[in-house]
Image: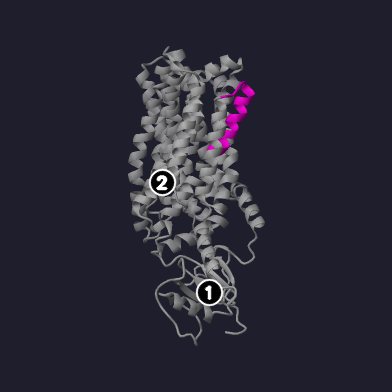
Amino acid sequence: MAGTSEQLYVSSPGPYIMATATPTHPPLLPTESDVPSLAPGSYDIEKQREGPVHISSQSEYETVVSEFQQSDTVIIDWDGPDDPLNPRNWSTRKKWAAAATVSAFTFISPVSSSMLAPAVEQVAQEFNITNSTEIALTISVFVLAYAVGPLFLGPLSEIYGRALILRAANLWFLAWNLGCGFAQNKGQLIAFRFLSGLGGSAPLATGGAVLSDMWLPEQRGEAIAIYSLAPLLGPVIGPVAGGWIAERSTWRWVFWSTTIAAAIVQVCSIPFLKETFAPVLLEKKAARVRKEMDVEKGNQRAVRTVFQTPERVWKQLILKAMVRPFVLLIQEPIIQLVALYLAFIYGVIYLVLTTIPDIFSNVYHENVGIGGLHYIALGLGLFLTSQANARLLDRVYIYFKMRNGGVGRPEFRLPTVLPGAFFLPIGLFMSGWAAEKHAPWIVTDIGLAFIGSGMILTFQGMQTYVIDAFTTYAASALAAVSCFRSLAGFGFPLFAPPMYNALGYGKGNTILAAVALAIGPPSVFMFWKYGDRIRGMSRYAGKSALSAKKEKQ
């Protein structure tokens, strides 16, 4: 072995390990030929050193380490496909506990984003805000932070892990959201809202990545369906509660109540949300191996995981990770098209959220508390459709996978999106003209339910599509999409009052419905027909294809 450059692969924690030697140096994301098989086996020490070595005792471990005195690097990987430390091998109960916690994080922030809407008139009176755009800004500035936060929180979760970033960001949100309740002028309120939105944006970038860490593509549809419901159901439930708080108490309790809820979620995350990101977990395993090496006996060598290179420098890694969402948004056609479509959908939902109080107070002459109850119609459309789609996503994916010779494709998530592309414009048209013509309130509510149904079908399908296409870089991909859509969520409510004042609810919603028809169905068809070809030209989606192959094995 003298004079050779070899590496020792270690694939289980502690001293009882599995190892193999190879002359190759895996890149940051190794190819299948670079990573040794972890299946059981052994070899003759005098022959070329290939294949795994079984180690069942401390003495055997010391023997193997001694035999590889001249190897350059120890490579850390999972202990085979059934390693219990691998999040994909966790029990169903443990996975769903983590998924529920992430969904709670994702739910509480959007609740705060829209809960102020029914109470905004109180805020305007107290701070003497008369401009309609400034009034809308107190609500939508929170969503503007959604466009900024994921761009650095998503990449940071790919360096330091999902759980750490989620908890730290929630603490940041909690602190500034509490501050909103003590704001003394409109400047403080707007600034504190933006800062709290930065922390609240973390689950939008990292939540889907957590689910991707735990489930295979054909298993993750139901979990992502529930997770995707949270950022849309939150803004619906928020105003219902906010309306009654505004009527019975002060607008400041809108923020104090959500702060209490965020604190409860933070405490629950400690036992239920464990780290899921493989590179971080393997780095912890590598740290244990380094600690066990005996420096005095000359056993100290470089130790790294299969995701690292010897030349890895933290400064360069952080720089690459922070830039990656921008690169994806600029270079990846898939991200650009999905972001454009979801930006319109997200903008519409926040436009609807901010106009519901006006419709039911000015057209139907209801008080704030009763008017807020009409958000339930939107919520019912979201919730009921989400539950049905959660059961369909994986079934549809598996059906098309079987028809494709057992090979899955991200495009198999799209069939459930198509009905949503038609439900949304139907709902916009119905609710707009019902309000314009003073039709019974139930007609307007049915239109709102169609809007909710169309939104959740689109969000669940397209978000799962992005996660499947960019598995390894799911957090950065979701951050790029979230940035674009959040800018729309910020901007749409600002032009809503002038648009409806000029055109009325009927013509205004008809224009939005026409745009939805022009964008929705053609986008779904294009992704279905040309998505595979577009991904083939992608640098990042191409790397995710490797992950899909390894998952299948």
Whichever of callouts 1 and 2 sits on the residue coming sooner in the sequence is 1
Magenta segment includes 254 = no
Q: Which residue is mark 2?
A: 99
**Whether residue 222 can be seen here:** yes
Asked whether, in this view, residue 214 is left or right of residue 479, the answer is left
Residue drawn 48% across the image and 20% down it = 118
Amino acid marked by disc 2: Ala
Q: Position of residue 38 (x, y in %)?
A: 43, 71
- In terms of secondary structure, where does tag 2 sit? helix
Please report the bounds of the magenta region as a residue range: 182-200
- The residue lying toward the viewer, choosing from 70 and 449, is 70
Which percent across, then down, holds residue 406? Answer: 37, 60
Amino acid marked by disc 1: Leu
Judge whether 19 appears above or below 115 on screen.
Answer: below
Mark 1: few/some/many CA within 10 Å (<14, 14-19, 20+):
many
Which residue ends up furthest to the top in the rendered image? Answer: 365
User: Is residue 197 on the magenta stretch?
Assistant: yes
Quarter of the C terminus within the rendering: bottom left
Q: Nearer the viewer, residue 111 or 274?
A: 274
Residue shown at 65%/60% (left/top)?
313
Q: What label sits on residue 8 in the rendered view?
A: 1
Mark 2 crowd level (few <14, some 14–19, many ≥20, 10 Å Cα): many
Colour basis:
one colour
**Image position, residue 413 (x, y; %):** 41, 48
**SS category of the residue bearing label 1:** strand
